[in-house]
């Protein structure tokens, strides 16, 4: 380091001498390039002040005492500044590392979400899921068996960032590892609850709605674990009804039990699953109410399921100046034939 300082001192001496005698643009340019060298060698501000003083004393042996004293004062000031600067650099480097880790986790989250919507002859399915920030706490999943029965899940992981991504991963693989029970909503939630309770911190838990549709009987069986109630639309009566499913959030109690509900799905009927980021959308100082959400769905229900969820999302996002306060997930499962 001593040798480096000596080399830098000679370079700086040349640049300063040239600038003082010529006042040229070339001198300013070399000074700018020299600052990059200082950063590369991690030379602190106080070290540069010390070099500047030594060069001045060598170039001007009769330098006034007041000027020398002012440089001593500047050196003291820059010592404190230099410590703060190095701490800032350290924090900035750490922030970059964290941003890189979050980007990796966010990319991992995307790989956990379904790549495509399952194709079931009698169903039209649409989903939109938008994180409020880089990382999302919302999750959705589809499962299909050999009889074209389809299971749909929507979950909200209470917690953000990398822990939520890891928890999401656990939920996906736990669901995929229960083939004999994955289309039985209550049994699936009970198994997931044991996995969650044993593997996540006490300050984290998961809400979920899970349903299974059988195209042979056109019945929809579902169960809930503390999740935001969705809606069921009856085409015949043109009425919406709350799709409520009583149940405690996953991970709260080891011995939690879940009740299973069922609905007969007629042609034109549809199921709405959503996260609380939908119902907690804010317009000014108030939250949008559930009737307003139903009204938005009604405005677009003549469209395909995917067009409906995308249109409702756009309307709610526009009301919030496209600044979501919470993760937003909306899913519609409609029987067409």
Image: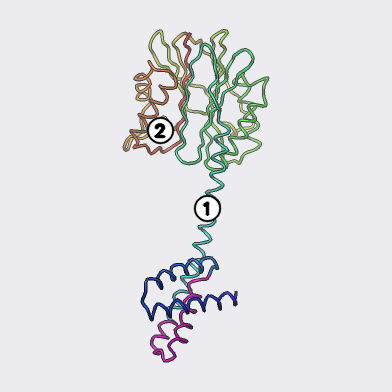
Task: Judge whether 23 appears above or below 155 on screen.
Answer: below
List the single residue furthest toward the bottom.
Answer: 62
The answer to whether marks 1 and 2 mark residues whose Cβ atoms lie closer than 8 Å is no
Point 59% across, 22% down: residue: 143
Image-based side of 215 in relation to 34, left or right = right
Give x and y (percent) for residue 7: 55, 76
Point 44% across, 37% down: residue: 326
Point 47% across, 15% down: residue: 334
Colour option used: rainbow
Q: Quadrant of the N terminus?
A: bottom right
Location of mark 2 (residue): 280
Inter-mark Cα distance, 1 to 2: 32 Å
Secondary structure category for the residue under label 1 = helix
Residue 67 among those drawn in magenta:
yes
Image-based side of 195 in relation to 70, left or right = right
Give x and y (percent) for residue 182: 63, 21
Q: Earlier in the sequence, mark 1 or mark 2?
A: 1
Quarter-wise, where is residue 250 in the image? Answer: top right
* Depth check, front residue: 18 or 141: 18
Secondary structure category for the residue under label 2 = loop
* Depth check, front residue: 187 or 337: 337
Location of mark 1 (residue): 96
Task: Judge whether 42 appears above or below 288 on screen.
Answer: below
Mark carried by residue 237: none
Give x and y (percent) for residue 310: 41, 26
Point 53% across, 61% down: residue: 90
State the predominant SS element of the stretch in magenta: helix
Give x and y (percent) for residue 302: 38, 15
Q: Which residues are magenta?
A: 43-72
């Amino acid at each position: 380091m001593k040798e480096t300082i000596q080399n830098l001192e000679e370079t700086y001496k040349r640049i300063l001498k040239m600038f003082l005698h010529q006042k040229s643009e070339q001198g300013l340019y070399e000074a700018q390039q020299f600052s990059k060298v200082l950063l590369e060698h991690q030379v602190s501000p106080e070290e540069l002040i010390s070099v500047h003083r030594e060069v001045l004393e060598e170039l001007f042996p009769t330098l006034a005492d007041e000027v020398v004293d002012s440089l001593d004062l500047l050196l003291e000031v820059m010592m404190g500044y230099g410590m703060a600067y190095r701490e800032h650099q350290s924090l900035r480097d750490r922030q970059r590392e964290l941003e890189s880790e979050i980007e990796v986790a966010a990319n991992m989250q995307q790989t956990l979400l379904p790549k495509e919507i399952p194709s079931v002859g009698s169903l039209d399915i649409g989903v939109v899921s938008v994180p409020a920030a880089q990382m999302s706490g919302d999750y959705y999943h589809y499962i299909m068996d050999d009889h074209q029965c389809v299971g749909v899940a929507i979950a909200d992981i209470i917690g953000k960032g990398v822990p939520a991504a890891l928890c999401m991963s656990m939920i996906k693989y736990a669901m995929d590892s229960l083939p004999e029970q994955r289309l039985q909503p209550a049994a699936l939630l009970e198994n997931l609850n044991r996995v969650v309770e044993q593997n996540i911190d006490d300050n984290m838990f998961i809400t979920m709605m899970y349903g299974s549709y059988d195209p042979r009987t056109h019945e929809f069986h579902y169960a809930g674990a503390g999740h935001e109630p969705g809606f069921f639309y009856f085409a015949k009566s043109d009425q919406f009804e709350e799709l409520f499913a009583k149940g405690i959030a996953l991970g709260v109690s080891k011995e939690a039990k879940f009740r299973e509900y069922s609905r007969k799905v007629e042609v034109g009927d549809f199921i709405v699953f959503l996260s609380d980021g939908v119902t907690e959308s804010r317009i000014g100082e108030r939250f949008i109410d559930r009737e307003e959400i139903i009204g938005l769905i009604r405005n677009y229900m003549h469209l395909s399921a995917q067009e409906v969820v995308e249109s409702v999302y756009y309307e709610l996002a526009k009301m919030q100046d496209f600044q979501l306060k919470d993760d937003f997930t909306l899913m519609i499962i409609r029987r067409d034939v």
